[in-house]
Amino acid sequence: EIAHAVLWTGRAPGAAVSSLLAAADLFVVPYDAGGTDRRSSLMAGLAHGLPVVTTPSPVPSSSLRDGVNVALVPPGDADALAKRVCALLASDDEQARLRMGALALAEQFSWPAIARRTRALYAQVLQS
């Protein structure tokens, strides 16, 4: 049982959220409609380099990849969620792999990366 290790914070200011995420071992965000790269809460976990456990979107995502940058479980399946969380807590190697994948994915959505892609697009349009 991991209930003793779960911290329910309620609403918190941004700086406090960042501090809490920096101290976390995992980030568990199951969504009924699935996780996507448009969910700011999911992206916050990735940006903090946390192993993220979430649910797949009904529309396949090319960015969220099970076992590479997130751990996916079926929506509404509490048993699968609990098993995946316990398996992750027991595997330093899988946690490390997901942390690296999370940071790599978060970098793609950082403002400097977005600015580079926007600049490259404008340059391409101007060359046409």
Image (spheres, rainbow, N blue to C red):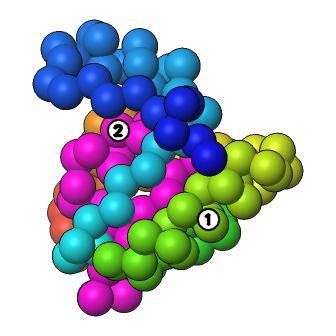
Question: Closer to us: mark 2 or mark 1?
Answer: 1
Residue type indicated by callout 1: Arg
Please provide the residue range marked out in magenta. Answer: 35-61
Q: Is residue 9 visible?
A: yes
Which sits in the foreground, 10 or 70?
Answer: 10
Give the side of residue 71 with respect to residue 41, left or right. right
Label 2 crowd (10 A; few <14 / some 14-19 / many >=20)? some
Residue type indicated by callout 2: Ala
> What residue would you read off at disc 2?
44
Q: Position of residue 3 (x, y in %)?
A: 51, 39
C-alpha distance separating marks 2 and 1: 20 Å
> What residue would you read off at disc 1?
84
Q: Position of residue 60 (x, y in %)?
A: 36, 87
**Secondary structure category for the residue under label 2:** helix
Residue depicted at x 47% and y 33%: 6
Give the side of residue 71 with respect to residue 118, left or right. right
